[in-house]
Image: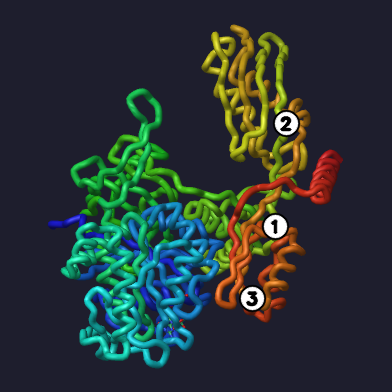
Amino acid sequence: MSREISKLRNIGISAHIDSGKTTLTERILFYTGRIHAIHEVRGKDGVGATMDSMELERERGITIASAATHTEWNGHPINIIDTPGHVDFTIEVERALRVLDGAMLVLCAVAGVQSQSMTVDRQMKRYKVPRLAFVNKCDRSGANPARVTDQLCEKLKHNAVMIQIPLGVEHDHEGIIDLIRMQACRFEGENGEKIVWGEIPEKYKIEAEARREQMLDAVSMFSDELMEAILEDKVTEEMIHVAVRKGTLSRDLTPVLMGSAYKNRGVQLLLDAVVRYLPDPTDVDNEAFRVGKDGEEETFILSNNDADPMVAHAFKLEDGAYGQLTYIRLYQGTIRKGDNIYNSRTGKKVKVGRLVQMHADQMEDIEVAHSGDIVALFGVDCASGDSFSDGTPVSVSSMHVPDPVISLAVVPADNKSQANMAKALNRFTKEDPTFQTMKDEETGDTLIMGMGELHLEVYLERMKREYSAEVTAGKPKVSYRETITQSTPFDYTHRKQTGGSGQYAKIVGTMEPSDDGEFHFDNKVSGGNIPTEYIPAVEKGFLSMLGKGAFVGHPVQGLRVILEDGNSHAVDSSDQAFQSAARACFREQYGRGKPIALEPVMMVSVEGPSEFQGEILSTLMQRRGIVQGTTEDDGFVRIDAHVPLSEMFGYATVIRSSTQGKAEYTMEFAKYAPAPAELTEKLVKEFAEKKAAGNK
Ligand code: GDP
């Protein structure tokens, strides 16, 4: 099979809920010949859009799990990674973004850039994803693609440039005017499959001329050839395409296209733009880690070359009817059916029994996958985020995974539910690194932890539906942390005589706060005062104490241990002695570091009509919010504030009732911050009570 990687496109569609992403995806699959009928979203005809494969999703009308679908447009293979819009599932979005080369930003022509678009846009920036914008719903009353383009520039700081204008809006919407071709395009036939180009109607000519000039001005910044051609009046379509592609790839330009997915207008031209302007896998540098000759970790750029050793990344797991389905992206080399591949994390070899290309919930068996491809493996046991190679340990750079900030206790109704719950939790934690489980030592209950109320709710529902686990859930609880605020030197000797042999270990150093919230262990012991083989035991000893701090009984974060000196004994020193020394030292020193309690603080963005600015502000103020920024635009206001998560329970209802349902909000973990005195007192008291109860 011949195959040109330069033709391949791996793209994501990211959008605010309700902007029409599902409808658009459905149309794309229809025009590319993947599906043969168009279904209404939300299953009015009982079928539902092809991309929404989970029952739950259909019901909620939001896409929770990202599915990858393969299709083809004009000889270009395209993989579409569906990225969920809801912010509680941010990790899904981030994981999808990691494997994308480019993306479409779908916006509603009426609602424009909304708070969720901003969150998703921030993530795209983090992963340096080039994108183009599609302004959907041009047929709706109030549609204004030019205004949405301005918002892209002002609110998201894009250099957004319209390469089309609508051929009428609202009731008059007929199609689009292409500013590169300078022709009008209509979409005829029952499903808009017939593309009819024609002259620009007289009444749109002046606007089209003006917008083209604007477009050329912006686009010529990326091409000297085009700039000269403009002066000499010798501009060709191809020159413009080349310049737009260049600007898009460097992320200095966002071409804006438009139409109406629902009315079947503009989708084919959007596909043309995907192929023309978005990157192929070789346009993007993807980094990976491997162990170099000197034993140190080194980074290298993955080659996208089929002849190089295989490197792949598992970005999504799904529990299908036939076992675990693992979506992978290949960054170099090939995978053939029957190949043995190595999981770099576990060091285990696995055989590729079946290799498939996915189309939502249908699949197609394939023999070989090439560099750049997104395919799925069957029955391969691994976790989401694992890397595969041909034998050498290689890891595709780790993803930004935020810590869970909320937890609740789950109690199964009976033994059967208990077993099912265990199965379900095992699966979910593999699929989603921001979803974790833990045993509550005090109560013996199982705790589930995640990024927000809705995040946990979805998993509770999935437990019930997919695994028939009947569970009762406790109240959600915020995950607090604690840390020290002062540096404290230590000099600790662990000595114990038990019968014949003894235990001896001496450690000297400093415990201090670290700025990044992580645990660090710096070994500065010289002269072999502590034999190197015992150093890891010291680190392990300290690490084992971090699960539960001595101040409020929550995990300790942001600690740096500097080990400077120590002593050992030829007979009595052991791993165990050094671990015990570290633990006892931590216990003794922790209080001297002036510990404080930390609480998770969220970045909350609320958006609504300006007349509700006062109401929105007061809901945030009542929740100890600290405003980070306010933007006003066209009768809408957006307020960004840092708000402690503990104050955010039930906020959805509050914001709805205080703004007549007209404002909406998104929330994303921002940081851990010192808890105020009152809360600290409460946590200290709770911890003391728990300890007292435990001692009875
Ligand atoms: P998603 O939440 O972004 O996936 O959006 P959906 O595709 O579910 O669409 C949300 C609603 O908008 C549905 O009722 C669609 O029928 C409707 N819709 C989608 N695209 C258009 C469009 O181009 N014009 C109009 N008028 N409605 C649309």
| Percent x, y of residue 181 | 22, 76
| Image side of residue 610 versus residue 365, left or right | right
At label 1, which amino acid type do we have? Ile
Judged by depth in the image, the label closer to the viewer, 2 or 3, is 3
Frontmost residue, 146 versus 585 = 146
Q: Which of marks 3 and 1 is nearer the N terminus?
A: 3
Q: Residue furthest bottom?
A: 171
Check disc 1 and report its element: helix, strand or loop. Answer: strand
Labelled disc at residue 610: 3
Residue 506: x, y in percent?
67, 14
Q: Is residue 196 above or below residue 581?
A: below
Q: Is mark 3 on a helix, strand or loop?
A: helix
Quadrant in which the N terminus is drawn: bottom left
- Mark 1 = which residue? 626
Q: Which three-letter amino acid code belongs to the residue tagged 3?
A: Ser
Is the residue 584 above or below the residue 244 in the image? above
Disc 2 designates what residue?
Answer: 486
Query: Please, is residue 8 above or below residue 439 in the view?
Result: below
Q: Which of 623 and 462 is in front in this view?
A: 623
Percent from the top left, x then y, of residue 625?
71, 59
